[in-house]
Image (cartoon, grey):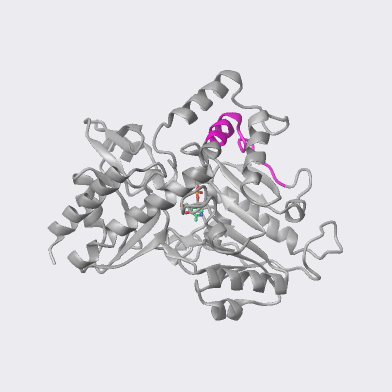
Amino acid sequence: MSLRALERQFLFQVYPRQPLVLVRGRGPYVWDDRGRKYLDFFSGLAVCSLGHTPARVTRAIFRQAKQLWHTSNLYYTIPQIRLAQALIAKTFPGRVFFSNSGAEANECALKLVRRWGQPATGDWKGGSTQTRSEVITFHRSFHGRTLGTLSATGQIKFQRGFHPLLPGFRYARLNDVASVEQVMTPQTCAILVEPIQGEGGVVPATPEFLQALRRLADRHRLLLIFDEIQTGVGRTGTFYAFQQLGVKPDIVTLAKGLGGGLPIGATVATPAVADLFGIGDHASTFGGNPVVCAGALEVLRTLTPAFLARVRKMGQRLLTELQKLPAEFPVIREIRGRGLMLGLELTIEGTPLVDACRARGLLINCVQERVLRLLPPLTIGEPEIRAAVQILRDAFAIMGP
Ligand SMILES: Cc1ncc(COP(=O)(O)O)c(C=O)c1O
């Protein structure tokens, strides 16, 4: 039986898989089971931040795998604590909770919101005088697939058929402060936002908008939460996207690129917010696993200021090359994004272009039907950028006018 037939028989049919069996990866390239090589401008959905099987991280994982794999969080382990220390050094003074995915990182943030919404007279020194629990999120946002994060996600297409959802989410329009004020009620307790909506079509929130959210949050004692699961860990050219935007959240969530390919989620909060949880209030069996943390620590060590400056430079190179395309192919309506997270909005469906690129050895993806999303490894170089843009050009050329 073919691998595709086996997959159909034995796995939940939930993924629209590309017709590729990938068996090997090295740097910005992956190979399929027929030996064909692909330039990977998708990075396993913004995860393989240092490319595939980076030597430093591989060594760190091996070293730890020979020592200790798993202990549970009922014991102290060295990689977890070292990783938390390294992560806080790149964030703001605070504390970290480690989990295994982006959705879990956001769930932890949503539980902190519940505590923040308790009256300050109780056990928890939250920001409320009466119980509050509503969270403002945004249309076209994406925060995960658990029931809580699905409820936070402002896209009906993901929620259809899964009602009743968790109550207490109100959706506003990105970059529209008035729409945020409109959905605010005395019950509002937090605002959750992606600095750049990834799944929603690579749509950046403006610095002015995020700064206005900070002011609103301060005025009404709301928690401001940035979901940097896709934008974080250097993707936009700084460790966090918010570091270019002149605004600081109370909680920031990470996953994807943090493990460089290993499953990890992290919720970082200011000490006052983190301390809303006491012993036993939140937990994860696998979160902060020593092998995963040893790998993630090596990812963080790689993300030096010089490395991030290079990400910004390569992001600019890629943008400059892409900006030559709309003159040749008017189906490209807009190019947007930051650093190495770029989107091309088209006037036509994007899937045929994804297929044409793949046939020519380039992996990209398409979101919101008409936005091609480019997420190369942060280690990408100029020759690969030139090669990828040439493949895109060839793919557009066969689409016709
Ligand atoms: C911004 C954002 N938040 C949350 C998630 C969910 O992450 P995970 O799939 O690891 O649960 C994603 C995944 O694409 C994401 O892009």
The residue at 57%/44% (across/down) is 265
Relative to 323, is 151 on the left or the right?
Answer: right
* Picture quarter with the N terminus: top left
Q: In this picture, is 37 found above or below 64?
A: below
Taking 305 as reference, is 217 left or right?
A: right
Q: Nearer the viewer, residue 14 or 297?
A: 297
Residue 336: horizontal and vertical position, in percent?
37, 64
Compared to residue 102, the image places residue 115 above or below, namely below
Near-viewer residue (86 or 119): 86
Does the magenta segment cover residue 291?
Answer: yes
Picture quarter containing residue 335?
bottom left
Q: Residue 168: x percent and y percent?
A: 62, 68
Quarter of the image for residue 125 reads bottom right
Determine if residue 321 is in view.
yes
Range shown magenta? 282-298
Residue located at (40% from left, 51% from top): 313
Give residue 294's position: percent from left, percent from top.
57, 31
Q: Is residue 99 above or below residue 75?
A: below
- The stretch drawn in magenta includes residue 341: no
Asked where in the image residue 270 lies, by quadrant, the reply is: bottom right
